[in-house]
Amino acid sequence: MNNFPTRETPRLLLRELTPQDAPRLLQMYGDAQAMQWLGSDPLTELAQAQALIETFATWRQQATPGTRWGIECRLDGQLLGDCGLFKWSREYRSCFVAFALAPDARGRGVMGETLRTVLAWGFAQMQLNRVQALVHPQNQASLQLLERLGFEQEGRLREAGYWAGRHHDLLQLSLLRREFRP
């Protein structure tokens, strides 16, 4: 995985996140309301957003690699969110998916379009058989989106997450290669 796997859709450019994206990521990941679902505390400083970009860049060099795409609007070049496949187990042909979308980009089908593209790439290029997602039980928007894409709920992981000073249950969902409809 040497070259970044840029992808395109009719409306979106899925590309590597760069240091220039840090202010927008701070805006996205600094939103306390949105972060209640994303499994970490809100960012408060630009340096934290820059560190997040560096973390995503290192995913591709880890023993269990991953890729995190920035989601850019092709019309105006604005960063709308990010999406990634990570904790790739080559042996088991599985990984996790995670995503975040700026509040002003919600409700426009951006993440559905992104996930279809990312999942198609993962099943083809990574030879995945299974993609997993962990979602807060009250994050109805993400649960509905994943279920529309064919993900099935497998169970509740009790107090598996910890952020905002307390433990949170997470729902585990998965999508198998044979269930995926691009």
Image: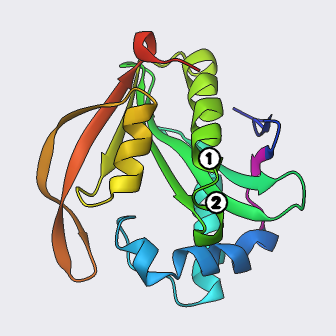
Residue 88, percent from left and from top: 46, 33
Residue ID at (90%, 55%): 75
The residue labelled by disc 1 is: 109
Q: Amino acid at mark 2?
A: Gly
The residue labelled by disc 2 is: 81
Residue situated in front as seen by the camera: 4 or 110: 110
The earlier-in-sequence mark between 1 and 2 is: 2
Camera sees residue 47:
yes
Which portion, as a residue range, is magenta? Answer: 13-18
Q: Is residue 26 left or right of residue 90?
A: right
Circle 1 — which element? loop
Residue ID at (61%, 23%): 120
In the picture shown, does residue 116 fall above or below 110? above
Residue situated in front as seen by the camera: 94 or 1: 94
Residue 152, percent from left and from top: 28, 29
Q: Is residue 144 left or right of residue 106?
A: left
Circle 2 — which element? strand
Dot 2, crowdedness within 10 Å: few (<14), some or many (≥20)? many
Q: Is residue 91 left or right of residue 128?
A: left
Residue 96, percent from left and from top: 41, 39
Q: Amino acid at mark 1?
A: Gly
In the picture shown, does residue 111 fall above or below 36? above
